[in-house]
Amino acid sequence: MPFRSSRPWSVLGLGALVVLNIVLIGLLVVRPAPGVDGGAPEVAPSASPAEAAEGEPPAKREPVELPTPSEQPDRREPAERIIVGADAATAWRAEVGDCSDPATLERTSNGGESWEELALDLAPVSRVRVLGPQTLFAIGGAADCEPTYLSSSTAGSSWLSNDQYLEGSWYLIPSDRATMATPAGTVAAPCEAVDLAALDATDAALLCRDGDLALTSDGGASWEETEAPITASAIGVRDGGFILAGAHESCDDDVAVVLTTVDGAALDDTSCVDAGDGPLAVSGGPDALWLWAGDATYVSTDGGQSW
């Protein structure tokens, strides 16, 4: 049998492989690289809003509008006035002032029909307390607004300095109303204070600028806040408790006055006084209640039933 060589087929197979490799290499060379020659690279699809919210925290946004004044918290201003009475005829009233604006003091002996101006070298006056028809003391700012204690046994026509009595006394620090002196020592005021009413060595109340009362029964060592029975803007001491003046729905546009216990609870029904607009000051004693509203003063000798 004649022998047939397989070389031609081997040569053809090898040639086919060479041609195939050349074609493949050519394809790799001419294939465009993504994004290099202007071709757009593939872009992953963007997440839907729901997916973005689920995967990432929401972006912060500025408010589109600000609260209107009526939506702002109702805040009282610090007390501008003080009034204290000895009886139904005799009382003292003061414009508080500040460290750069001296206080003023006046006295009446005819139930508020007329007032006599008295000298008082305080700027401001933080507290006035009547001890008798001719006797009272005042605490406030002296030089550099440092606290000082003045006392008078001549109804306020002359004064003596008695700073030794500052220790143990109640008062808001003249240069810093966020700090107060108490029988327990100097402490941070429990709230932003409108005014302080100190009944004795243990019981006192602060009317806070948010309208609440801060009360203490241990000389200022601890305080408890409670809601005032009226929308109060003034507080004072009365015989055995406190007295508030301000607004109440039962009084419409009149000034509301209410007596409270040392716990801040209303003692009687709210009294309504047909008084003018303006800053308020109020206080009470064993014989009479005094209210200073606008340009007028009012006296009640029946516990606030009439003025």
Image (tube, rainbow, N blue to C red):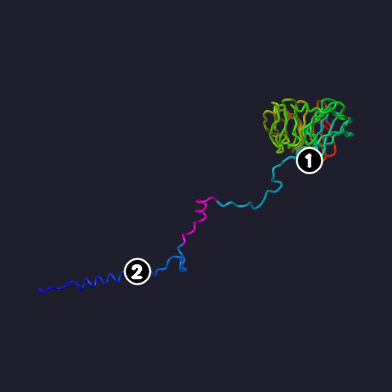
> Position of 72 compared to 140: left or right?
left
Q: Is residue 45 inside the magenta stretch?
A: yes
**Residue on which disc 1 sits:** 253
Question: Which of marks 2 and 1 precedes in the sequence?
Answer: 2
Q: Relative to residue 54, is residue 23 drawn left or right?
A: left
Magenta segment boundaries in residue numbering: 43-57
Instruction: Answer above or below: position of 33 versus 220.
Output: below
Residue 221 included in the magenta stretch of the image: no
Q: Secondary structure at mark 1?
A: loop
Q: Residue furthest left?
A: 1
**Which is closer to the viewer, label 1 or label 2?**
2
Mark carried by residue 25: 2
Within the image, what quadrant is residue 241 found in? top right
How far apart marks 1 and 2 lie (CA) works out to: 98 Å
Residue at image point 71% right, 47% down: 69
Residue 15, by quadrant, is bottom left
